[in-house]
Image (cartoon, grey):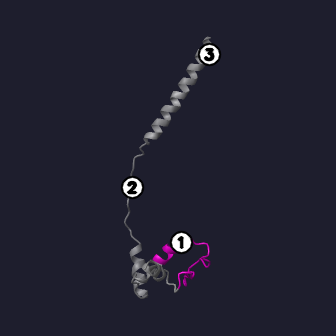
């Protein structure tokens, strides 16, 4: 049962056959694909079969292009807030400076 489902999923006749992708945009050689990559590629292929794509029309294209441009201006303002790790790093640095200063003072006194 599992073997049949795998064959149906990969669209192969025999379980020993190598799956093929007939339409590939850039990649032509799939010999280095891992099983996970094969599964992903074939799942995308299955999903793409069920996507309804309307026929091309020049009016639909120009309407989509007109919608992409807007005259709305959006103003953003934000306040920079340091992360707690920044304060921690600053505190550690100051403590290290104080420790070095104290050691120098003690060494100078002796």
Relative height, residue 91 to residue 50 (above, below) = above
Q: Are marks 2 and 1 in contact (CB under 8 Å)?
A: no
Looking at the rendering, in which quadrant would you find the N terminus? bottom left
Q: Residue drawn at (46%, 80%), measured in percent from left and top?
A: 9
Stretch of the chain drawn in magenta: 14-43
8 or 93, nearer to the observer: 8
Q: Say which element carries label 2.
A: loop
**Residue depth check, mark 3 versus mark 2: number of the one nearer the observer:** 3
17 or 28, nearer to the observer: 17
Q: Which mark sits nearer the N-terminus, 2 or 1?
A: 1
In the image, taking residue 9 as reference, residue 22 lies left or right, namely right
Instruction: Give the CA separation, mark 1 to mark 3.
Output: 66 Å
Relative height, residue 104 to residue 1 (above, below) = above
- Are there few (<14), some (14-19), or many (20+) residues within 10 Å of tag 2? few
Residue ID for mark 1 = 35
Q: Say which element carries label 1.
A: helix
Q: Mark on residue 76?
A: 2
Q: Is 18 covered by the magenta stretch?
A: yes
């Amino acid at each position: 049962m599992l073997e049949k489902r795998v064959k149906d999923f990969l669209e192969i006749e025999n379980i020993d056959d190598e799956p093929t992708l007939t339409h590939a945009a850039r990649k032509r050689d799939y010999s280095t694909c891992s099983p996970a990559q094969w599964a992903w590629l074939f799942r995308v292929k299955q999903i793409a079969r069920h996507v309804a794509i309307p026929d091309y029309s020049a009016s639909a294209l120009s309407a989509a292009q007109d919608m992409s441009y807007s005259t709305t201006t959006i103003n953003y303002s934000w306040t920079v807030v340091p992360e707690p790790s920044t304060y921690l790093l600053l505190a550690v640095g100051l403590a290290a400076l104080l420790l070095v200063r104290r050691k120098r003072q003690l060494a100078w006194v002796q």
